[in-house]
Image: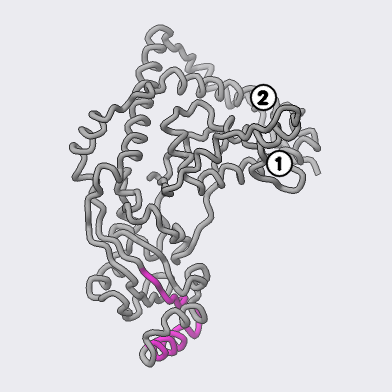
């Protein structure tokens, strides 16, 4: 996890780097709770950052929430109809999976974006409807923007032509490297998987987690008066927390869910907040905790004690992780071998003068 967690209730100084520590507990795999991130200094839902659909392997770095019912049948299968109904057969065998106006994305185009993924990676991707949804969404947005760019003949610009050439070469190289260095489908074996599980049991422990709700009062003029009014309402009727959150909380995303934030692990929570949680029983309400952004009144909805998932619960993620590491090691060895056969020579003098002799260009977008 290279992205730094935003500030707020989340602890920016601590964060799990291990695959299993950064994955939700098994109990969460079938949860319908919205996955949350932090925006600015408040807890809120955050839209997914756009990704590059040309490299679907990047999707597999995300956490997979695998529903019991696999999507493989709906994703990979083609419906064949009676002979003679050619147009209908074509429509059924390559259905539209998304559209914006008249722009459509078909099943075959989604499959093509998977590139050089192996069967293990494809199965993992097929188990994650949210990621597939994001992929189709990105493809559609790309098509809309592409349509506009082509209408303005942006593809004929000299800078664009150079970019197309370099992008094509990079795509071919990347695809080839991944394909020739992909581990065999038999890797890892069941024996290798179990050995990795046993050797990494300590790292698999899922820390204590809290399911929280909040009422947020922002730091601004009149905030203290508003805070006292909230406290008085909760004192008179603690059970009204959800209603007060909907009506008063100034963090709109959680307010729309009766103040619910969702599940957070200990190391994701700011120390000031975390210090209050062990003192609270389930459904207890905290005193206001002041952070840089304002006051947070918290309610503990549920608590999960630390636990280590069993082998079957992490088997798929472990296989995916091992294959990714094996592929990375294979690529590094392959590149090293290429460099040994073809030593690189760089003209430092010419390189230092490169930018001096290159005129600056600012290509404006055509109106």
Please name the residue that numbered disc 1 is placed on: 104
| The N terminus sits in image quarter | top left
In the picture, measured across the screen, residue 350 lies left or right of residue 182, that is right
Q: Nearer the viewer, residue 273 or 281?
A: 281
The magenta stretch spans which residues?
212-234
Q: Residue at x 39, y 21 (%)?
A: 331
Mark 1 is surrounded, within 10 Å at the Cα level, by few (under 14), some (14 to 19) or many (20 or more) other residues, namely some
Mark 2 is surrounded, within 10 Å at the Cα level, by few (under 14), some (14 to 19) or many (20 or more) other residues, namely few
Q: Secondary structure at mark 1?
A: strand
In the picture, measured across the screen, residue 117 lies left or right of residue 18, that is right
224 in the magenta segment = yes
Label at residue 162 = 2
Marks 2 and 1 sit apart, C-alpha to C-alpha, by 29 Å
Residue 194 lies, in percent from the top left, at 22, 34
- Dot 2 and dot 1 residues touching (CB under 8 Å): no
Q: Residue at x 52, y 81 (%)?
A: 247
Asked which quadrant contains residue 295, the reply is bottom left
Residue 158 lies, in percent from the top left, at 73, 26
Give the vertical position of 288 relative to 180 (above or below): below
Asked which quadrant contains residue 185, the reply is top left
Asked which quadrant contains residue 105, the reply is top right
Q: Residue at x 35, y 49 (%)?
A: 23
């Amino acid at each position: 996890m290279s992205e730094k967690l935003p500030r707020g209730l989340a602890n920016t100084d601590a964060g799990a780097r291990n695959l299993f520590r950064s994955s939700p507990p098994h109990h969460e795999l079938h949860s319908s709770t919205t996955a949350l991130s932090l925006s600015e200094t408040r807890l809120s839902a955050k839209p997914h950052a756009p990704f590059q659909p040309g490299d679907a392997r990047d999707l597999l770095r995300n956490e997979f929430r695998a529903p019991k019912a696999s999507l493989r049948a709906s994703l990979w299968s083609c419906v064949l109809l009676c002979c003679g109904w050619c147009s209908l057969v074509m429509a059924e065998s390559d259905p539209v999976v998304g559209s914006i106006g008249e722009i459509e994305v078909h099943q075959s185009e989604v499959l093509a974006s998977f590139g050089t993924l192996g069967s293990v990676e494809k199965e993992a991707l097929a188990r994650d409807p949210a990621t597939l949804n994001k992929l189709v969404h990105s493809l559609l947005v790309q098509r809309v923007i592409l349509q506009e760019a082509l209408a303005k003949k942006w593809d004929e610009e000299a800078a664009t032509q150079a970019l197309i050439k370099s992008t094509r070469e990079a795509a071919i190289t990347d695809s080839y490297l991944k394909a020739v260095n992909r581990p065999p489908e038999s890797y890892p074996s069941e024996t290798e998987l179990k050995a990795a599980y046993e050797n990494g049991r300590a790292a698999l422990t899922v820390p204590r987690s809290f399911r929280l709700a909040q009422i947020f009062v922002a730091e601004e003029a009149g905030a203290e008066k508003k805070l006292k009014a909230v406290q008085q309402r909760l004192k008179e009727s603690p059970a009204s927390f959800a209603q007060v959150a909907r009506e008063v909380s100034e963090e709109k995303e959680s307010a729309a869910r009766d103040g619910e934030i969702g599940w957070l692990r200990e190391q994701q929570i700011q120390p000031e907040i975390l210090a209050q949680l062990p003192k609270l029983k389930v459904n207890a309400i905290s005193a206001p905790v002041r952070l840089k952004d304002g006051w947070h009144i918290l309610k503990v909805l549920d608590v999960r004690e630390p636990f280590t998932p069993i082998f079957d619960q992490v088997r798929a993620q472990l296989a995916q992780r091992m294959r990714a590491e094996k592929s990375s090691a294979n690529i590094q060895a392959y590149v090293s071998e290429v460099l040994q056969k073809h030593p690189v020579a760089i003209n430092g003098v010419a390189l230092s003068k490169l930018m001096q002799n290159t005129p600056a260009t600012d290509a404006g977008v055509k109106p």
